[in-house]
Image (spheres, rainbow, N blue to C red):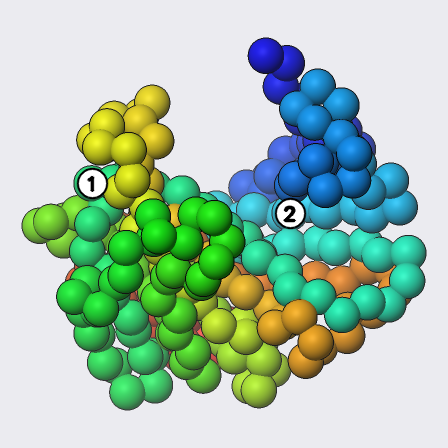
Amino acid sequence: SIRHGSPVLQFKNQGTTQITRAVPLDWDPSLHGGDQDHPLIWESMVLGKDLTLNFNNLGSVAKYTTHLVLPAASHGTLAMPAGYLLSSFNRYWTYDARSKTLAEVSAAMPDGCLSLNGSSFGGYSFFVNAGGIIMSDAAGVNAMGVYGVGVNQGGSVSYFAMWKFFCWGDGPSESASDNTAWSAVYGNGADVLFPVGESTYNVYLISDSVQNVATRMDDLFHLGAR
């Protein structure tokens, strides 16, 4: 089958920052008469990122700034960004940087396979004024966290979400379909108005052990990162 990528407008490295901009493809072209060989683009939109490694000399922290350009103001929901990890990342955590509260929520994670048809949310959502979510392996040695500040505190995050899609039984290999998914989300569909022109949204990605990810979230909180 033919696989299409989004038309790229810009791709460059500037110091420790990777900059990309693209015209986005429609996630499901069949909704508008297309298919996998007939993709649809949103020709008046631009979606991209600035990804800065070693943010503020914090080593394992990368600042992820999402850039969105719209031809007209619109309500909506933006994953800024979403990510997919191997199914070996099978423990799930939340972290509140204000209270320094790390909580494992693995037992509360629903089976995401039941929501693949779009009939339900199927994940675990979390709101925090400052903090984030962490996904780790069984030992907690390898982990990825996403830090952000709530919209009500001048940040970009309406809520965080995690999903467990262990639906195909093909294990944690690089080519497997089983995965842990996550997202930092701005907007709930109708509560915020995305402006015409360019707007930006920030979160911070951290790769380390669970405890070290939480420590870096503390650092970001004390820095006032938004």
Residue 171 vertical position relative to residue 114 in the rendered view, above or below: above
Q: Which residue is mark 2?
A: 49
Q: Is residue 8 visible?
A: no
Q: Residue furthest top?
A: 1
Position in image of residue 43 (x %, y %): 87, 40
Which quadrant holds residue 19?
top right
Query: What mark, if any, has residue 163 been given in the picture?
Result: none
Which quadrant holds residue 172?
top left
Q: Quadrant of the C terminus?
A: bottom right
Q: Nearer the viewer, residue 120 or 89?
A: 120
Residue 142 vertical position relative to residue 68 in the rendered view, above or below: above
Residue at figure coordinates x 29%, y 40% from the top left: 167
Q: Quadrant of the N terminus?
A: top right
Position in image of residue 22 (x %, y %): 74, 37
Residue at figure coordinates x 40%, y 43% from the top left: 84
Which quadrant holds residue 13?
top right
Query: What mark, if any, has residue 88 been given in the picture?
Result: 1
